[in-house]
Image (tube, helix red, strand yellow):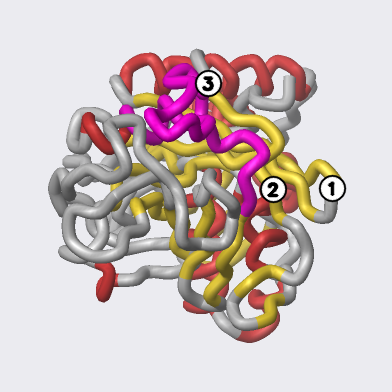
Amino acid sequence: ESHKWGLSRCRLYWGDPPVPNYPDCRPMICVKPQRIMAFNLFIFVIHFEILRWKVLLNFPTKIAEPVVLPLLELAWHEYLQEKKKELRGETWEYPSSVMCFIDGQLLGSEKELLSWAYDKWNYQDFKPVALYQAITEDFCTKYMQTSQHVFVYLDIAIQEQPTGTLLFELYSDMCPKTCENFRSLCTGEARTSRSSLALTYKESIFHRLVKNGWIQGGDITAGKGDGGESIYGPTFEDENFSIPHNKRGILGMANKGRHSNGSQFYITLQPAPYMDKKYVAFGQLIEGSDVLQKLEDVSTYNERPIVECKIINCGVLVP
């Protein structure tokens, strides 16, 4: 299914975990176990069972109990980029989406880790990837069910070619009115406005792209950047400014000044603290980092994409 969740990512730590400084991670209190060797593992969920259970069962006095700090797809990619910047050198061209460390030194991907585990502990794994895929999907489903948030998707086409899906988590507990407006515009259930405008994002375009800033869409009137309406009327008030623009992928409402939210929205391409207290952020991109990158790479003229970037389908994702 085109809207089914892909792999969620995790950071796993063996031994004494560092203090997490990524905004998606919740602080954890851990008791340092006695161990001979510590290694950090930044890896897909599908490999978690390999190391957590088999290695610990076989070598309970050698390997510390892992601390698992889950990251969703976009947050995972952003974390990897920050890690590459931190390590510098040849690491900037590091091709894998998995990083394994032993005593602070980069070992390599999961392949190097399994090779090391075999040489060091005579450990091998023969379970099919499909099993770990099922574990991952179960993890994602439980996350969505317990978050009490709304999840919506936008199917994107660039130059009439389907490109992929953007999946957003809406902070419906913090900005319920704003989130309901966006959700309803995704489903199209409000049908038409009093001015007979179709209240849906389907077939609307991204009309503005500010490099290193944000990408903007949601003008459901004519796609020129000066139109759009909310489900409550032409505009509605700023609900609150509780969500900061502190990372890539923040979803917020574009406006023409205070209390002028309609249907236009933006997605940040990097942290944008100057937007705080001016624009209402109400969600974040959690999957579709490759799609966002493709949108960002589109050439522009006067901040307008020179090729059509369109929402060809949209709706609510129910786990």
The local crowd at label 1, few if under 14, some if 14 to 19, many if 20 or more residues have their Cα within 10 Å, is: few
Please identify the quarter of the rendering in which residue 211 is found.
Answer: bottom right
Nearer-N-terminus badge (2/1): 1
Q: How far is mark 3 from mark 1, CA to CA?
A: 23 Å
Considering only vertical position in the picture, is 110 above or below 96? above
Q: How far is mark 2 from mark 1, CA to CA?
A: 8 Å
State the residue position of label 2.
310
| Rendered residue at 38%/29% (across/down) | 194
Q: Nearer the viewer, residue 251 or 97?
A: 251
Please identify the quarter of the rendering in which residue 167 is found.
Answer: top right
| Residue that extends furthest to the bottom in the rendered view of this protein | 89
| Rendered residue at 70%/15% (across/down) | 131
State the residue position of label 3.
317
Q: Amino acid at mark 2?
A: Lys
State the residue position of label 1.
160
- The magenta segment is 180-205
Q: Nearer the viewer, residue 23 or 184?
A: 184
